[in-house]
Image (cartoon, grey):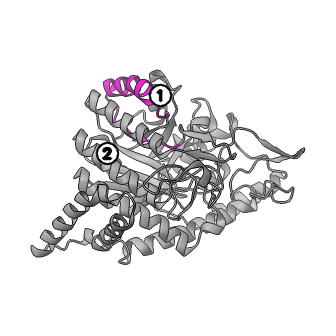
Amino acid sequence: MSTSAATGDLDAWRSLPALQQPEWDDPDEIRAVAAELANQPPLVFAGECDQLKAQLADVARGEAFVLQGGDCAETFDGSNADAVKNKLKTLLQMAVVLTYAASVPVVKIGRMAGQFAKPRSKPAEVRGGVELPAYRGDAVNGFAFDAESRRNDPHRLLKAYHCSAVTLNLCRAFTKGGYADLRQVHAWNRDFVQQSPAGRRYEQLAAEIDRALTFMKACGANPDEFHGVEFYSSHEALLLEYERALTRIDHLSGLPYDVSAHFLWIGERTRQLDGAHVEFLRHIRNPIGVKLGPATSADDALALINRLNPEREPGRLTFITRMGAGRIREALPPLIEKVHQSGAPVAWICDPMHGNTFEAPSGHKTRRLDDVLDEVAGFFEVHQALGTHPGGIHIEFTGDDVTECVGGGQGLAEGDLHQRYETACDPRLNRGQSLDLAFMVAELYRKSA
C-alpha cells in the first residue's frame, strides 16, 4: 500500500454517518486543533501495537487471558501520580491472582491514557428547566452544569492528548521501575487477604502463590518477568477527529497506525457497518475491538469480521460482549457458534459492567457485584459448553475506596452510595470489589480448565 493511498483511505469515513460526535461551534477551530495534534509525538509505537496483536492472537488460540480495566471516563484531574498508581496497583494485583490460578499468561490492558470521551444516550441534559449539552467526557466539555463548562471546546482534545502522555509516562515508569515486581504485588494481595472482610475465602489461593514464589526463590529462579510487566493502553475510538489526527504512517512498514493507544474499540452505539467508526478503524493496523450487546445477531458478528478483519489476521479483532447477567446465557451461544464455525480467529472478552447498570432509589446509577460476577460466570459456562476459550474480562474500576457499586466483601449497600460517589459517568468497582472479582474469576477459570 502506498503512503498516499493509505492516507486517502484514512479519510473515507468523512463521507459516512458519524454518530456520537460533538457539535463544534467553529469548524476552523477544530481544524486548527486537529492540525496541532497531527504534529504531536506519538503516544505509542507501531511495534508495541504489533506486540499486543501477537499476544491477542495467543488469546484467540486459548493460550492467554486478557485483563482490561480502568475508569469509565478518565478526568483531567485524575491524571496524577497517586490516581494512576492506585489504578495500576489494582490491575497488577488482579493479574497476579489470575495468572497463578489460570496458569496462562495474562495480557494487561489499561482502560487508561485516553478514555476521556463517552457516548451519550441524549445530546442534551435538562435540570430545573435549564437545557445544556450533555457531558461527553473531559475531552469535549466540562462536568459542571453551566453554559461555559458544557460548551464543546476543541482545545480540550489537546489537553486529553497531554494528560494521556502523562498517564502513559507514569505507567511505563511504574511497570518498568520496580513497582510491578511480582513479589511486591503479591505482598499487597497478602495484605488484602488479611484485612478484607471476605479475605478468608482467598487465603488458600494466596498461600499457594506464596509457596510457589518461595519455591522459585529457593531454586534461584529470578527471571526478568518477575520485576516488570508489559502494560498496554486502550480506549474507545469515539472522537474521530482526534483519532485521525493521531494516526501516522509507520516508516518501517508504510502502514497506518493510530498512535493514541495500543488497542482501540468501537462501542455498541457506533458499530454500524456503513458508519464512520467501522470505516476508519478498518484501515488502521492496531489490534481493535468491538462491543457487542444482547441484540447482536450472529450475522452481525460475521459481517463485522468481514469488514474489519477480512484477511482473518490472528490478534487483529476482539469481540467484547456486554449482554447483562440475565441475557448472556441465551444471547452469547449463537454468536460464538457461528463465528467458531467460520474459522475466523477472534478473542472473546466479557464486559460484565455495561449490561448491569440500574438506578438506586437515591438516584445514583449503580451495579451489583453479584450481577457482574453472574455475567462472568455465564460467559465461562457458555464457552465451556461450546468448547471455546473465555478470553478475558473488561471492567470499570478505580484504585480508590469509592462507593459506586453495591455488594462485595465490604458489604456496600444502596444506602452507602452517597458516601464516596465520585465517578464522572458510570459506577466503578472499588479496589476491594475488584480484587473480590479477581479471586472469583480465578475460581471460575480453574473449574472450567
Name which residue lies at 60% across and 44% down.
8
Q: Is residue 231 visible?
A: no
| Rendering coords of residue 301 (x, y %) | 46, 28
Label 2 crowd (10 A; few <14 / some 14-19 / many >=20): many
Q: Which residues are magenta?
A: 324-353
Name which residue lies at 68% across and 38% down.
18
Mark 1 or 2, closer to the camera: 1
Indicate the secondary structure of the residue bearing disc 1. Answer: loop
| Rendering coords of residue 397 (x, y %) | 50, 56
Indicate the secondary structure of the residue bearing disc 2. Answer: helix
Which residue matches tag 2? 59
As measured in the structure, the alpha-carbon distance from the residue carrying label 1 to the one carrying label 2 is 24 Å
Q: Amino acid at mark 1?
A: Arg
Query: Is residue 337 rendered magenta in the image?
Result: yes
* Between 221 and 152, the one nearer to me in the picture: 221
**Labelled disc at residue 327:** 1
| Rendering coords of residue 443 (x, y %) | 28, 47
* Between 56 and 423, the one nearer to me in the picture: 423
Q: Is residue 313 positioned above or below 247 on the image?
A: above
1 and 2 marks in contact (CB < 8 Å): no
Query: Is residue 62 rendered magenta in the image?
Result: no
Q: Amino acid at mark 2?
A: Val
| Rendering coords of residue 245 (x, y %) | 63, 55
The extreme right residue here reads: 129
